[in-house]
Image: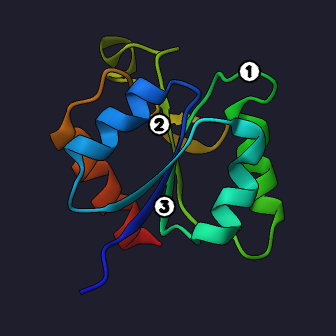
């Protein structure tokens, strides 16, 4: 059975490595250079993209807009992972940033798993 492909775009290599170790049931590709994220996504063809919001040179919002503008990536679900909003602040608020769902860092493996499954089934 083919594993679900997830692209993780985050400028912190330690975070992407940890995600890859914790979420072994998925085929995870790490991209720590946000400027290469579109190129990586086009070659990897992910089923879902997890993306940081604040990264050097290009933010997640602009990167997500570039994905939506590309015919091969426009239907790939994108979920932001961000430390800009804490888990307690995210509690009762709308769970979207710029029209995209988000999870607040630090995120538990269980919450991440639920989010991934929810967005894959909706796609």
Element at badge 3?
Answer: strand
Q: Nearer the viewer, residue 91 or 82?
A: 82
Height in image: 95 above or below 69? Answer: above
Question: Residue lying farthest left?
Answer: 110
Residue 104 lies in quadrant: top left
Tell me if label 1 and label 3 are in contact, CB under 8 Å: no
Mark 2 vs mark 1, CA separation in Å: 19 Å
> In the rendered image of this protein, does residue 9 appear above or below residue 52?
below
Image spot of residue 114 (x, y percent): 23, 51
Q: Are marks 2 and 3 in contact (CB under 8 Å)?
A: no
Side of 79 where 36 appears, left or right: right
Q: Which sits earlier in the primary sequence, circle 2 or circle 3?
A: 3
Q: Could one spot residue 100 in this view of the protein? A: yes
The residue shown at (59%, 35%) is 32
**Residue 105 percent location from the top left of the image:** 37, 22
> Callout 2 environment at 10 Å: few (<14), some (14 to 19), or many (20+)?
many
Q: Residue at x 79, y 38 (%)?
A: 62
Q: Earlier in the sequence, mark 1 or mark 3?
A: 3
Q: How many marks?
A: 3
Rendered residue at 78%/40% (across/down): 35
Q: Are marks 2 and 1 in contact (CB under 8 Å)?
A: no
Mark 1 highlights which residue?
Answer: 56
3 or 92: nearer the eye? 3
Label 3: few (<14), some (14–19) or many (≥20) C-alpha neighbours in 10 Å: many
Residue highlighted by disc 3: 48
Above or below, 103 against 64 in this view is above
Residue annotated with mark 2: 102
Task: State the image quarter where residue 108 is shown.
Answer: top left
Q: Determine whether, in the image, residue 25 is placed left or right of residue 5.
A: left
Q: Earlier in the sequence, mark 2 or mark 1?
A: 1
User: Mark 1 or mark 3, which is nearer to you?
Assistant: 1
């Amino acid at each position: 059975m083919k594993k679900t492909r997830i692209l993780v775009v985050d400028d912190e290599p330690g975070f992407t490595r940890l995600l890859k170790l914790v979420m072994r049931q998925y085929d995870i590709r790490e991209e720590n250079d946000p400027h290469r994220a579109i190129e990586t996504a086009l070659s990897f063809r992910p089923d879902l993209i997890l993306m940081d919001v604040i990264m050097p040179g290009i933010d997640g919002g602009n990167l997500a807009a570039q994905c939506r503008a590309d015919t091969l990536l426009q239907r790939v679900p994108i979920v932001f992972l961000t430390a800009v909003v804490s888990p307690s602040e995210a509690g009762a608020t709308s769970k979207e940033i710029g029209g995209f769902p988000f999870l607040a860092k630090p995120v538990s493996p269980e919450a991440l798993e639920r989010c991934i499954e929810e967005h894959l089934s909706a796609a």
